[in-house]
């Protein structure tokens, strides 16, 4: 039987309808600016985020890194939450590619306050790196899919503007924040100079992210993308999947959130497990395992043997993520399998 795969919302497979849209896509050489489907996707994302322009890139990592490179100079400093994707999972790219000093700040469930950001901005001084970028993540993956309050973003923006910082949003799952709160995407995006969104997570496209900002910034980002080797040719085939995802798969994220919430509550009832239900706001569930009861590798492999997949997420932590290829019934079966593994 096919396993119930809750490792990530990136494991989804394109549906037959999405594949049809891909097969029928009109294409051209996108590096030469000739691919109408890519242009349509970029325009759609820019419009939804309220930005002047956007650029299609292969991955969320490249999208973040193109933004950081384009917005900074070597020797600059970027402020990030300690558990952010940029710090945790991008292979030190800010240092390796852009020569940036990454300055981690511990957030509360991944969320920074304006006062924290203000405390870490350096005054101009010949001895010091120049604090140049503040990057936020909404929703925050490692914190368990937590949502940035709009007021907090507005307060951070005031600090950023005062000090001339660039505001970057890693909005890989901004769609989830939008659906969970009802706050329009363009309101979430407005305080930021650059916004990265992913099509290949909850929205179910096989590949692709989009970086948005001003026309001038995106023109520069186009050069950066080319330098990174991310210029693609008849890539409308993939962009068509992104368009399909935007048109069909955003409202249904509410189902993923409901499934995740039910699963989180179920797992939290098991004595060997703890889920911070305050963090279970969208489609990600971070689960603490009592180390006296079971190790993470043991838990993961015993659960896999029962046909349910999750992913290690720390020394005593695993992650479950709901998405469009798992149903409410799958999540109930997954909870029952976890119960058998931990003897609940
Ligand atoms: C918050 C966040 N940002 C960026 C990325 C990077 O996306 P990609 O895997 O497409 O490089 C991820 C991937 O899971 C993510 O969770």
Image (cartoon, rainbow, N blue to C red):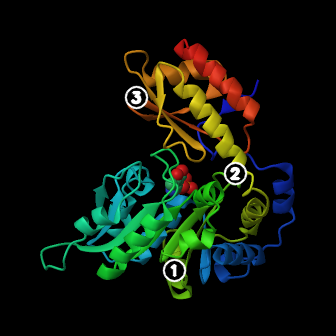
Task: Name the residue at 48% across, 52% down.
Answer: 140
Identify the mark nearer the N-term, 2 or 3: 2
Identify the mark nearer the N-term, 2 or 1: 1
Identify the mark nearer the N-term, 1 or 3: 1
Q: Local crowd at mark 1 within 10 Å, few (<14), some, or many (≥20)?
A: some
Image coordinates for residue 276, horizontal then vertical, percent: 47, 36
Image coordinates for residue 131, horizontal then vertical, percent: 27, 73
In the displayed structure, would residue 194 be above or below residue 342? below
Q: Tags 2 and 1 in contact by the CB under 8 Å rule? A: no
- Per the model, the C-alpha gap separating discs 2 and 1 is 34 Å
Residue 316 bears which disc, if any? 3
Frontmost of labels 2 and 3 is 2
Q: Image quadrant of residue 19?
A: bottom right
The answer to whether one can see residue 151 in this image is yes
Secondary structure beneath dot 1 equals helix
Q: Quadrant of the C terminus?
A: top right
| Residue toward you, 230 or 74 | 74
Instruction: Residue under label 2, please give it.
Output: 253
Image coordinates for residue 289, horizontal then vertical, percent: 44, 25
The answer to whether one can see residue 12 in this image is no
Q: How many marks?
A: 3
Q: Local crowd at mark 3 within 10 Å, few (<14), some, or many (≥20)?
A: some
In the displayed structure, does residue 301 sit left or right of residue 99?
right
Secondary structure beneath dot 3 equals loop
Instruction: Residue under label 1, please give it.
Output: 223
Image coordinates for residue 30, horizontal then vertical, percent: 68, 76
In the displayed structure, would residue 158 be above or below residue 174? below
- Per the model, the C-alpha gap separating discs 2 and 3 is 28 Å
In the displayed structure, would residue 77 be above or below residue 321? below
């Amino acid at each position: 039987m096919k396993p119930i795969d809750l490792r990530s919302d990136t494991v989804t497979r394109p549906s037959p309808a999405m594949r049809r849209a891909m097969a029928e896509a009109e294409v051209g050489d996108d590096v030469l600016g000739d691919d109408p489907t890519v242009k349509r996707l970029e325009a759609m994302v820019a419009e939804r985020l309220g930005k002047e322009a956007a650029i299609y890139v292969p991955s969320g990592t490249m999208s973040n890194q193109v933004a950081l490179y384009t917005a900074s100079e070597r020797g600059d400093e970027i402020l990030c939450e300690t558990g952010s994707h940029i710090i945790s999972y991008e292979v030190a790219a800010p240092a390796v590619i852009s020569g940036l000093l990454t300055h981690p700040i511990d957030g509360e469930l991944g969320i920074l306050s304006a006062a924290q950001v203000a405390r870490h901005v350096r005054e101009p001084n010949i001895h010091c790196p120049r604090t140049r970028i503040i990057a936020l993540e909404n929703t925050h993956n490692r914190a368990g899919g937590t949502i940035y309050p709009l007021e907090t973003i507005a307060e951070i923006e005031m600090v950023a503007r005062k000090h001339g910082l660039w505001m970057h949003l890693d909005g890989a799952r901004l769609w989830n924040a939008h659906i969970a709160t009802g706050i329009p995407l363009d309101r979430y995006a407005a305080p930021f100079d650059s916004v990265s969104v992913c099509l290949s997570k909850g929205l179910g496209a096989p590949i692709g992210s989009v970086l948005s900002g001003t026309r001038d910034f995106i023109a520069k980002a186009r050069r950066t993308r080319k330098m990174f080797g991310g210029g693609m040719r008849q890539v409308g085939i993939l962009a068509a999947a992104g368009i399909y995802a935007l048109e069909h798969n955003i409202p249904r994220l509410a189902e993923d959130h409901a499934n995740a919430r039910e699963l989180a509550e179920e797992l939290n009832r098991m004595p060997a497990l703890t889920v911070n239900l305050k963090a279970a706001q969208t489609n990600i569930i971070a689960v603490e395992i009592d180390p006296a009861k079971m190790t993470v590798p043991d838990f993961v492999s015993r659960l896999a043997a029962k046909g349910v997949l999750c992913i290690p997420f720390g020394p005593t932590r695993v992650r479950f993520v709901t998405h469009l290829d798992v149903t409410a019934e799958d999540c109930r079966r997954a909870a029952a399998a976890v119960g058998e593994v931990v003897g609940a």
